[in-house]
Image: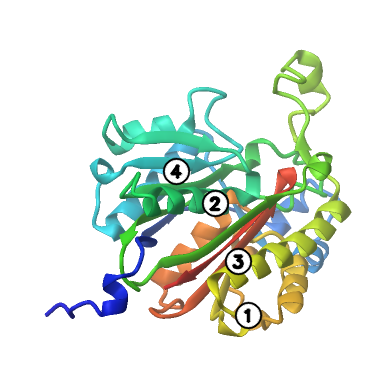
Amino acid sequence: MTTPPTSLERNAPRGARIVGTGSDLPEEIRTNHDLTRTLDTSDEWIRSRTGIGARRIAGKGDKTSDMARRAAQRALESAGLTGRDLDMIVVATVTPDRPLPSTASLVHHQLGARIDCAAFDLAAACGGFCYGLSLARAQIESGMARHVLVVGVELLSRIVDWTDRGTCVLFGDGAGAVVLGPTESSAGGRLLSTALGVDGSLTESLTVLAGGSEEPTSAETVASGRHYVKMNGQEVFKAAVRYLSEVSARALEQAGITADGIDWVVPHQANSRILEAVASRLGIPNERMFLNLERYGNTSSASIPIALDEAVRSGVIRPGQHLLFCALGAGVAFGAAVVRW
């Protein structure tokens, strides 16, 4: 029998909650030992600097939209919904199938979504999932949408230089998705806060130089490797520790929760040393960090929803617990969210 709502719940403003999660990971596992065959590196060197032991690599015929669709279907199944129930599809990615149309349009068609369901890509790199959550929350709380699908998906193995150990050891491929719906109660999965930011002065610290309007694709740009990810590791490290800590503190304050009240941090799986430093600044024990970085590497916008899906399906995350999401990527774009599961 359904419990009648309390007076507080009857008067509560419309909120947004996560009603389904899903993920998709390629079958190929490329370990650190595999990389030593072509790179001047070692398993110990990679692990000590990043915490990564392996990453997943998409098959030759697999596309970003394929991974996004599979993750989305699993999220819809867990929510008890279909593509016809969606009012909006947001795909966070910096590795779309093509420059146009959007990957979200392809996913929209593959899911059988309605014509009046909006669909578009969001480019905020590793911060993309948090940006998508914030946008979905606003759409639902305003009443403009009822069900929103947010997908984080990256096929980074196609834009890294596999001869550059400073970048190629970090990244992997994968997709994660959540479906959000409305709630007027304290039902599980409710988004309590979202916080976003950008430090545009650091755009050169993590970038792909060619392939856009500034430097269109040519034989010269391809030959010089300017379509690959370039990164200033020290700048990114310092920015990540600072801004992940700051944006997380903002999200906690907006949610009215202290760091002590967080049961699990589900962070962007970027680098173990970065995450340890952030946990220290926030005063959250390392053991409250849900990490799968060692097995999957940095999957950019996909890393939080992949980790969330894994933690939910394995029973690590339980009803009533408070979660903190936080991410930072190229731009430098960063974001955080607090959820009551």
Question: Which of pointers 4 and 1 indicates the residue nearer the eye?
Answer: 1
Task: Decide which of tag 4 and tag 1 comes sooner along the chain.
Answer: 4
The x, y position of residue 163, in whole percent, is 80, 41
Q: Amino acid at mark 3?
A: Ala
Question: Which of pointers 4 and 3 indicates the residue nearer the eye?
Answer: 3
Apparent side of residue 134 relative to residue 341 in the rendered image (left or right): right
Q: Nearer the viewer, residue 77 or 161?
A: 77
Q: State whether residue 230 appears in this view.
A: no
Task: Identify the residue shown where x is 56% and y is 70%.
Answer: 324
Q: Which residue is mark 4?
A: 68
Secondary structure at numbered mark 3: helix
Task: Identify the residue shown where x is 32% and y is 77%.
Answer: 8
Q: Which residue is mark 1?
A: 259
The x, y position of residue 277, in whole percent, is 78, 72
Q: Are marks 2 and 3 in contact (CB under 8 Å)?
A: no
Q: CA distance from mark 3 to mark 1?
A: 10 Å
Q: CA distance from mark 4 to mark 1?
A: 33 Å
Q: State whether residue 316 appears in this view.
A: yes
Q: Are marks 3 and 1 in contact (CB under 8 Å)?
A: no
Q: Are marks 4 and 1 in contact (CB under 8 Å)?
A: no
The x, y position of residue 196, in whole percent, is 63, 54
Q: CA distance from mark 4 to mark 3?
A: 27 Å
Q: Amino acid at mark 1?
A: Ala
Q: Label for residue 129?
A: 2
For residue 205, what is the image quadrant? top right
Task: Decide which of tag 2 and tag 3 comes sooner along the chain.
Answer: 2
Residue, far top: 219
Position of the N terminus by quadrant:
bottom left
